[in-house]
Image (cartoon, rainbow, N blue to C red):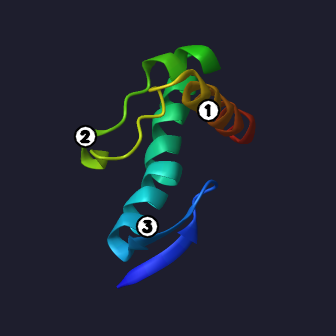
Amino acid sequence: MKSQGFTGETFVQRSQAYVIRSSRLNTPDFMKEVQAGKKAGKSVDEVAASWKLPAKYKGYTDPTSTPAQMTRLKANVQIVFDESK
């Protein structure tokens, strides 16, 4: 089954499995890693600099691949920091 979605830049058609995997990367998996870094006393910059794209998301754009992507990654890490206790 194909789903359509707006990725922020283009309108693309993706499989349902891709959409589910992507949502896991962008929420629970990412949040757990960031929260663990926060609990360990790391800063937003340290967590973002040490974050690596998990192997199970091979083929996804690496959020550390360009300065613009890294800026977005730091902003997402900051959101998790701000919303976590």
Q: How far apart are marks 2 and 3 (CA)?
A: 17 Å
Q: Neighbour class for label 3 at 10 Å: few (<14), some, many (≥20)? A: some
What residue sits right under mark 2 in the picture?
A: 55
Judge by depth and name the residue closer to the eye, 41 or 65.
65
Q: Can residue 40 be seen in this view?
A: no
What residue sits right under mark 1 in the picture?
A: 77
Q: In which quarter of the image is residue 75?
A: top right
Q: Which residue is drawn at 62% across and 54% down?
A: 9
Query: Disc 1, disc 3: CB below 8 Å?
Result: no
Q: Is residue 18 above or below residue 67?
A: below
Q: Position of residue 79 (x, y in %)?
A: 70, 38
Task: Kindly state the secondary structure of the residue where label 3 is placed.
Answer: helix
Q: Can residue 60 be seen in this view?
A: yes
Judge by depth and name the residue closer to the eye, 10 or 38.
10
How many circles with numbers are drawn on the protein?
3
Among the two numbered marks 2 and 3 on one chain, the one whose residue lies closer to the N terminus: 3
Q: Which mark is residue 19?
A: 3
Among the two numbered marks 1 and 3 on one chain, the one whose residue lies closer to the N terminus: 3
Specify the farthest residue to the right. Answer: 82
Task: Kindly state the secondary structure of the residue where label 2 is placed.
Answer: helix
Q: Neighbour class for label 2 at 10 Å: few (<14), some, many (≥20)? A: few
Q: Is residue 77 above or below residue 20?
A: above
Specify the farthest residue to the front. Answer: 10
Judge by depth and name the residue closer to the eye, 50 or 43.
50
Q: Position of residue 78 (x, y in %)?
A: 69, 31
